[in-house]
Amino acid sequence: MLACKPVETLIQVNHQLGIFPDQVPTDMGRYQRLVGKLIYLTHTRPDITYVVGVVSQFMHAPSEEHMDVVYRILRYLKGASGKGLLYSKNSISNIEGYTDADWARDQITRRSMFGYLNFVERNLITLKSKKQKVIARSNAEAEFRGMAQGICELL
């Protein structure tokens, strides 16, 4: 992938990844090795965390469509090689937290996704994105559950 053309985005907006009966399977061993290496890389590259979480859901039955997304992540990394986390000492002593949720994001289970970021002195200390354990009945419920998780971590 050294000669590949870089891309600016990790994944298409409103992607529809899932397991469908008419998908063409791909080499499971290669897929698992690549995704495993990307999971390790998320410790220093939180910008790829969401997409790596999405592709890691299909480790047991990857298709060509899933492998294309993994290749797209690699192409993104080629174009964004200088990015990463930078921690600095600041005189501002504050704690900030941000949360967000996406109602019924998973097309199969209809569970919502939530995520939160926590900063201490403008340095990122916590980043999490996860499916909610229950199915939310509304966008407000999904947002509230995500906010509750983020505040618990912040406290």
Image: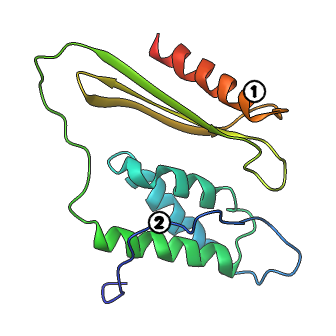
Up-down: is 5 above or below 18? below
Label 1: few (<14), some or many (≥20) within 10 Å? some
Residue 67, can we see it? Answer: yes
Which residue appears at 37% of the width and 45% of the height? 43
Up-down: is 120 above or below 59? above
Which residue appears at 50% of the width and 68% of the height? 34
Q: What residue type is disc 1 on?
A: Glu
Whole-percent x, y for residue 94 in the image = 27, 14
Horizontal side of residue 60 vs 153, given as left or right: right
Horizontal side of residue 29 vs 119, given as left or right: right
Which residue appears at 59% of the width and 71% of the height? 31
Q: Nearer the viewer, residue 14 or 154?
A: 14
What residue sits right under mark 1 in the picture?
A: 141
Q: Which residue lies furthest to the bottom in this view?
A: 3
Whole-percent x, y for residue 36 in the image = 51, 59
Q: Residue 10 carries which label?
A: 2
Quadrant location, the N terminus:
bottom left
